[in-house]
Image (cartoon, rainbow, N blue to C red):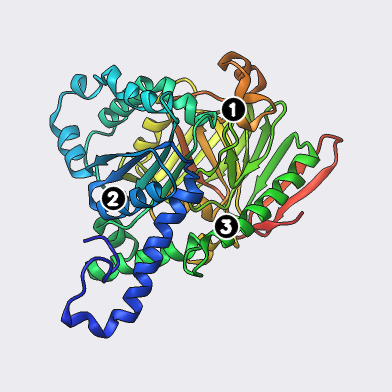
Amino acid sequence: TVFPRGVLVYTKMETQQRGREKMDEKLFKQYAEFAVRVGVGVLPRQTLMITTPVEAAEFARCCAQAAFEAGARDVQVRYEDEKLARIRYQNAAEEALCDVKPWVERSYLDYVEGAGGASILHILGEDPEAFLGLDAGKINRARQAARNALKTWRTYTMNDRVAWSIVAVPTDNWAKKVFPGCGREQAVEKLWQAIFDVCRVTGGDPVEAWRRHIDTCTAMKEKLNALSLCSLRFTGGNGTDLTVGLAEGAVWEGAASLTPQGQQFIANVPTEEVFTAPHRLRVEGIVYGTRPYVYNGDLIEDFWVRFERGRVVESGARKNAALLETLLDTDEGSRSIGEVALVPATSPINRSGLLFYNTLFDENAACHIAFGDGYPGTVAGGTSLTQEELLARGVNHSVVHEDVMIGAEDTRIVGVAGDGRRVEIFENGVWAL
């Protein structure tokens, strides 16, 4: 089981721990209610679409109940199975893996475009090494085909035309990776507690805690927007010296987002970042990764990349350098970056001291960049621009969007403001504004 001990069934042997387990059960329910009511912000008469690992079925059911109590018209759940996915990647012909039928995309669009519309909740519980030892190129091409087949649907999420949120729950293999010295049950319970802590659930009032956090992030992005920054220079003791020019009309975003209809949602839970659009042709220098990165179910560790005129021209890694090259060679835009995000070293994820081996968490422990696609909403008026107009502004385009961590305790960031002033943005890994 992947749920906190005592969430589902109590036995006579467990009565001594029942008090703590009741609190676990309470937090479990609060986390689900928060994910639905605040993370997604599901509206009355909407359909909530949930994607979830099969191991997280009980959490998905709890989310479904919360959605109906919030007035949802219906809840549709899609189960995913990494073990089955591994069997397919290992045995199916690449032609079959890449043959994604049109009904897959229509199954999303029919709900979003139908009566009441829809919101999307993604529940993650990935094994960081689910596809270890398999053909990385084959997996990458299959996933690229799936992204291409969902191209229209991706415009909904990338342009915030639909409310969506991602949350995570522990699974056995993920928990054992984070806590390798623990038995399975103890590792799962420790990971539950870590998730509750960094997602601001432990205090018992996640809605109020997130309201304060959103206010803090909003104040910081407003400070950055007031500077009208043209570029950022990252430096650090590990050798990083990277200058990131920003796209024309770059806008800083963070924490909560809004659909055109005014539905507020939090795309990533947790989130500590304030982010914007780099210019796809104006990135120069070298940068070193500060945390391992999980890509296609395998780990890339101690990587570095060097940019010239916005594109990666050299790269390397202590582990899985070839896998990094596979990512960078996905398409024309995957050697450029579509996002630059600032995260202070004081974030709860970094303070936890844990490496989660999951980008949803690890990207919120450190400043990061994303290879691939940019978000239209990170330039002024971007959600109403065509792809060609976004490219002209400098916003990158790709079928991938892969966040990699580059921030550290000694990271320094200096910005050039619109009036030419040099402004200290980060000093020793934290905000200097």
Front residue (pair 155, 82): 155
Q: CA distance from mark 2 to mark 1?
A: 31 Å
**Residue that carries the numbered disc 1 in the rendered image:** 376
Among numbered discs 1 and 3, the one appearing first in the sequence? 3
Among numbered discs 2 and 3, the one appearing first in the sequence? 2
Q: Residue 201: where, in percent of width, then height?
A: 47, 64
Mark 1 lies on a secondary structure that is helix
Q: Nearer the viewer, mark 2 or mark 1?
A: 1
**Residue that carries the numbered disc 3 in the rendered image:** 210
Which numbered disc covers residue 15? none
Asked if the residue under mark 3 is in contact with the one under mark 2, i.e. CB atoms within 8 Å, the reply is no
For label 3, the crowd category at 10 Å Cα-Cα, with few meaning under 14, some 14 to 19 and many 20 or more, is many
**In this picture, residue 334 sits left or right of residue 214:** left
Q: Amino acid at mark 2?
A: Asp
Query: Which residue is located at x 49 percent, y 32 percent?
Result: 162
Q: Residue 42: where, in percent of width, then height?
A: 47, 43
User: Which residue, as the protein is rendered here, is positioned at the far bottom?
Assistant: 16
Mark 2 lies on a secondary structure that is loop
Front residue (pair 299, 304): 299
Q: Which of the 4 quarters of the picture holds residue 283?
A: top right
Q: Residue 74: where, in percent of width, then height?
A: 35, 38
Q: Nearer the viewer, mark 2 or mark 3?
A: 3
Front residue (pair 171, 407): 171
Which numbered disc covers residue 127? 2
Q: CA distance from mark 2 to mark 3?
A: 28 Å
Among numbered discs 2 and 1, the one appearing first in the sequence? 2
Q: CA distance from mark 1 to mark 3?
A: 25 Å
Q: Which of the 4 quarters of the picture holds residue 310?
A: top right
**In this picture, residue 255 sits left or right of residue 27:** right
Q: Amino acid at mark 1?
A: Pro
Is residue 312 shown to the viewer in this render?
no
